[in-house]
Image: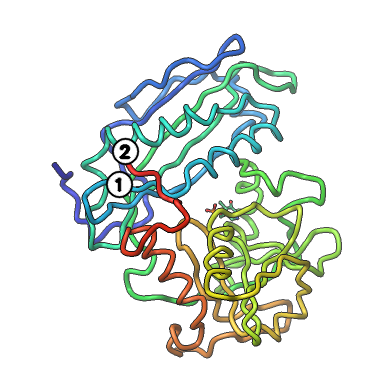
């Protein structure tokens, strides 16, 4: 059975499915996963998460395989990262078996919403963890709610592999040196909205942040990691304590090693932008997007000429992107055992 959806027109919007899952934590222990059909839920008006932001989330994808099964991409990595985010915000982590079971069950119960093959689409899973205890004085919750919601999502590249223009912010920082930049916490995204709005107004769909201590080293894009290919074919990505450890980045590094590239995780001076052959933004939503140009104050680093053929201008990123997608869609062997098949 498949839902009445035009798979070729899917975007990146919320779409209601058959159900989502919830689990509650009270008195020091997690309850069972429960499926819920209504997209609304009761939440206390003084719930911690609503006032003080005890909230973190994850994002991962599942792909229909050639044999009709569904492969979830590296869910145990997302489970561990969510546990680290929870620890940073003093929340009860979701036990890994429950996290994995939620992903599996969500797909089974929403099987008709998992896009069939041939549309470059996927089923996006969004786990969320919230502090729900009513509080007015600032303190951490002792009750938590785990949500696992999911929906079909279209390919970012329906109209072909498109490069993006990025802008470096001089007026806004993303993450403080000893802050929460390495955790996927909700507050980071609210804090970035104004910077994003400024960038978009200036014609830059993507924001790139420097480290907030020196404003000299590259950290990451607003919602994706920074990767670059040097002219001598090395894969470079920032080593920084204030960036979100992207699972896509980690996977691309492995694919780069497999291709015989050297991978360098190190500080990346913004001045190096003039020396890179290719720059990309990587994350679950897109795998990797080649960056056309980066503006920094009055300076513009042009990486790809406007209107150029991206697959020729960014050949290594294109290859990494295609290799990753081929693994995700089961078109080549899953040699690193990244897929959990449902
Ligand atoms: C989620 C996210 C990423 C990408 O991580 P993936 O695991 O590759 O999806 C990168 N940067 C930030 C700030 C993020 O929130």
* Residue found farthest to the top: 27
State the residue position of label 1.
70
Q: Quadrant of the N terminus?
A: top left
Occupied quadrant, residue 184: top right
Total labels: the figure holds 2
Q: Is residue 189 left or right of residue 103?
A: right
Instruction: Give the residue at the far right of this rendering.
Output: 214
**Is residue 68 or residue 334 the one in the foreground?**
334
Identify whether 215 is placed above or below 75: below
- Answer with left or right where residue 185 lies relative to residue 255: right
Residue 285 point in image, percent of width and height: 45, 57
Q: Tell me the number on the disc at residue 107.
A: 2
Residue under the image location 38 percent in, 55 percent down: 12
**Pointers 1 and 2 in contact (CB under 8 A)?**
yes
Q: How far from the left and from the top, in percent, is residue 106?
A: 34, 34
In this picture, is 297 found above or below 225?
below
Q: CA distance from mark 1 to mark 2?
A: 8 Å
Mark 1 or mark 2: whose residue is earlier in sequence = 1
Instruction: Report x, y in % for residue 192.
Output: 64, 53
| Mark 1, other Cα within 10 Å: few <14 / some 14–19 / many ≥20 | many
Q: Secondary structure at mark 2?
A: helix
Q: State the quadrant of the C terminus.
A: top left
């Amino acid at each position: 059975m498949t839902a009445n959806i035009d798979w070729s027109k899917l975007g990146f919007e919320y779409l209601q499915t058959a159900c989502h899952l919830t689990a509650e934590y009270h008195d020091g222990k997690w309850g069972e996963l429960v499926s819920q059909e209504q997209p609304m839920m009761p939440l206390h008006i003084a719930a911690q998460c609503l006032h003080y932001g005890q909230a973190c989330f994850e994002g991962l994808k599942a792909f229909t395989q050639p044999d009709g099964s569904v492969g979830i991409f590296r869910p145990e990595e997302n489970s561990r990262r969510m546990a680290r985010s929870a620890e940073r915000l003093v929340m009860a982590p979701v036990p890994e078996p429950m996290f994995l079971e939620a992903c599996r069950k969500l797909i089974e119960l929403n099987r008709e919403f998992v896009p069939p093959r041939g549309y470059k689409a996927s089923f996006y899973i969004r786990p969320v963890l919230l502090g729900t205890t009513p509080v007015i004085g600032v303190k951490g919750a002792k009750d938590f709610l785990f949500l696992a919601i999911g929906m079909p999502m279209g390919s970012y590249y329906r109209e072909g592999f498109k490069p993006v223009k990025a802008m470096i912010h001089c007026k806004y920082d993303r993450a403080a040196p000893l802050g929460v930049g390495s955790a996927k916490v909700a507050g980071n995204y609210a804090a970035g909205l104004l910077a994003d709005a400024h960038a978009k107004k200036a014609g830059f769909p993507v924001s790139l942040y420097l480290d907030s201590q020196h404003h000299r080293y590259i950290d990451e894009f607003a919602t994706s990691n920074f990767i670059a290919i040097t002219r001598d074919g090395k894969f470079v990505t920032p080593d920084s304590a204030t960036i979100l450890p992207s699972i896509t980045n980690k996977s691309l590094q492995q694919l780069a090693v497999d291709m015989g590239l050297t991978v360098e995780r190190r500080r990346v001076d913004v001045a190096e932008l003039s020396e890179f052959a290719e720059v990309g933004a990587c994350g679950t939503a897109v795998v990797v997007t080649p960056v056309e140009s980066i503006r920094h104050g009055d300076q513009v680093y042009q990486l790809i000429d406007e209107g150029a053929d991206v697959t020729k201008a960014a050949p290594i990123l294109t290859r990494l992107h295609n290799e990753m997608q081929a693994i995700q869609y089961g078109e080549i062997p899953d040699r690193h055992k990244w897929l959990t098949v449902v």
